[in-house]
Every structure is written in structure tokens, then in C-alpha cells.
Image (tube, helix red, strand yellow):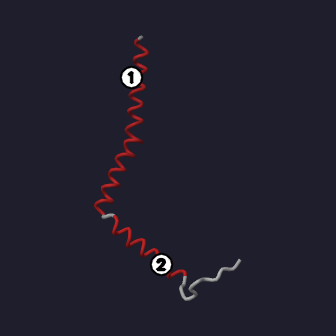
Amino acid sequence: MAVTPIDSTASTPASAEAKFNSAVDKSKEQITDEELTTALIDNAVMVGGQFIIMPKVQEILNEAMSSEDDEE
């Protein structure tokens, strides 16, 4: 099914480029480099805690629980 454009003078690549540039400009207004760096560090600490520290804590807890069972 063919669809006729409303404005035949507008080309799609220029329109797509304009939308992209608009999105880039809008994103620059919303967050600064310092805010982005802070957010990245905060999230890295959280992920590090979940994937590095928590498994080690679980291992230590399991060892402590098993040593209590051995003492009985």
C-alpha cells in the first residue's frame, strides 16, 4: 500500500538529522558532565557491591553456619 507524504519537499535524511540534532541538544540541557560522572560512579559502586562484595559475604556466612554445625 503506497502512502503519499504530506510535505513532498521535506527529505527523510534531513528530517532524521534534524531530529537527531534536536535530541542531542535536549540531552545536553538535561544533565551536565559532573552529574553524569557522579551517577556513573554511584551505579558502579552499587553494581560492584552486588556482584563482588555480596557473594563473598554469602560465602563467609555459609562458612560460619557450617562451622556452627560442626561444633554441635
Mark 1 falls on what kind of element? helix
Instruction: Judge the density around disc 2: few (<14), some (14-19), many (≥20) Cα neighbours within 10 Å.
Output: few
Above or below for 57 versus 42: above
The amino acid type of the residue labelled 2 equals Glu
State the image coordinates of residue 12 (x, y, percent, origin top left): 55, 81
Q: Earlier in the sequence, mark 1 or mark 2?
A: 2
Residue 17 shows which numbered tag?
2
Residue 64 shows which numbered tag?
1
Outermost residue toward the left?
34
Q: Is residue 41 left or right of residue 5?
A: left
State the image coordinates of residue 52 (x, y, percent, origin top left): 39, 40
The C terminus sits in image quarter? top left
Instruction: Judge the density around disc 1: few (<14), some (14-19), many (≥20) Cα neighbours within 10 Å.
Output: few
Q: Residue at x 42, y 36 (%)?
A: 55
Residue 37 shows which numbered tag?
none
Q: Nearer the viewer, mark 1 or mark 2?
A: 2
